[in-house]
Image (cartoon, rainbow, N blue to C red):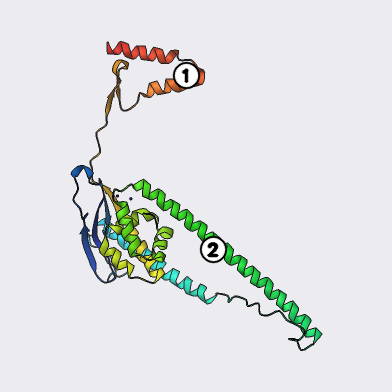
């Protein structure tokens, strides 16, 4: 797993099996104010519903985000049970691979020509099934490799898009802590695998807790539940709109003169630049 940058990860009331854990994780190293990341990624804003009945009336003071998280958790738990049931059913339906066996001979057939012919026909039927199974396995492996490569490319693109300053440090910690299977589940299953990796890399306690889950299905659903709690908040106030002076061409609000751009587009098509000259002359006259 490739994994770049500087954020503050705050972990708020998140669901752990039997207890609610609230913690805030800050970067280990202090940096100058102008180097601080301007976004905050949080994991949490969730409450445990282990003791909650499925149909309950929320008290008037219950925040809206609590209701939303409870609904998401119920959905995830239902999906978890359904997928586990499907996995069990599929495991029971797995067809044992066909064994080719040795090629029959007249001697192995007791020198009975009829038995020998029947054994040869059965042998070739088994051989055909063995080849079909091998072909299917090869196709499945190729499809899985192609799908995983696509997800890896998506991960790299998302990593570059987020552009966190200490991403590499967070990614390295995740790579060193999680197994290859666990890393593969994140890359293949997460909607935003890069953001999830960064959040985990900035939360060593949660990272260590998840690393102990060896069952792939359980791990996948824990990760899915965790990802549903991720939020990125811009903690920097939006910059005021810049007003750019165009000098002799007149004052322009924003970064471009839309009228001039339109005239240039028209001139490029008609090869007639008289309108541009007239417009600039008009602006120049205004300045005077």
Residue that numbered label 1 is attached to: 267
* SS for dot 1: helix
Cα separation between marks 2 and 1: 56 Å
Image quarter of residue 46: bottom left
Position of residue 78 measured from the top left corner of the image (x, y, whole percent): 39, 67
Specify whether residue 179 is in view.
yes
Residue 240, percent from left and from top: 24, 33
Find out whether the residues at labels 2 and 1 contact each other: C-beta distance under 8 Å. Answer: no
Location of residue 257 (image quadrant): top left
Question: What residue lies at 41% left-to-right and 66% top-to-bottom?
Answer: 181
- Residue at figure coordinates x 28%, y 64% from the top left: 206
Q: Is residue 203 above or below residue 287?
A: below
**Which percent across, then down, holds residue 34?**
21, 42
Rendered residue at 25%/36% (across/down): 239
Q: Quadrant for the C terminus, please.
A: top left
N-terminal of the pair, mark 2 or mark 1, is 2
The structure residue drawn at horizontal position 41% and vertical position 69%, both measured from the top left corner, is 217
Q: Nearer the viewer, residue 217 or 165?
A: 165
Residue on which disc 2 sits? 141
């Amino acid at each position: 797993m490739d994994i770049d940058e500087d954020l503050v990860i705050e972990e708020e009331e998140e669901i752990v099996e039997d207890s609610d854990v609230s913690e805030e994780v800050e970067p280990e190293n202090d940096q100058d104010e102008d180097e601080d990341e301007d976004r905050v990624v949080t994991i949490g804003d969730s409450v445990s519903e282990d003791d909650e009945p499925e149909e309950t009336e929320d008290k008037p003071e219950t925040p809206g985000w609590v209701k939303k998280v409870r609904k998401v958790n119920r959905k995830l738990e239902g999906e978890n049970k359904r997928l586990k049931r499907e996995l069990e059913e599929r495991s029971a339906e797995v067809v044992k691979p066909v064994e080719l066996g040795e090629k029959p001979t007249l001697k192995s057939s007791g020198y009975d020509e009829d038995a020998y012919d029947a054994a040869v026909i059965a042998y070739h039927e088994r051989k055909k099934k063995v080849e079909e199974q091998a072909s299917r396995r090869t196709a499945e492996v190729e499809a899985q490799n192609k799908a995983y490569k696509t997800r890896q490319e998506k991960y790299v693109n998302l990593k570059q898009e987020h552009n966190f300053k200490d991403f590499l440090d967070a990614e390295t910690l995740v790579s060193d802590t999680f197994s290859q299977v666990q890393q593969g589940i994140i890359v293949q299953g997460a909607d935003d695998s890069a953001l999830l990796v960064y959040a985990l890399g900035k939360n060593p306690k949660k990272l260590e807790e998840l690393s102990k889950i060896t069952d792939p299905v359980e791990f996948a659903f824990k990760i899915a539940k965790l990802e549903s709690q991720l939020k990125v908040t811009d903690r920097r106030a939006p910059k005021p709109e810049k007003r750019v002076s165009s000098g002799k061409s007149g004052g322009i609000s924003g970064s471009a003169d839309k009228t001039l751009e339109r005239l240039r587009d028209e001139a490029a098509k008609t090869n007639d630049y008289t309108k541009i000259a007239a417009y600039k002359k008009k602006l120049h006259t205004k300045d005077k």
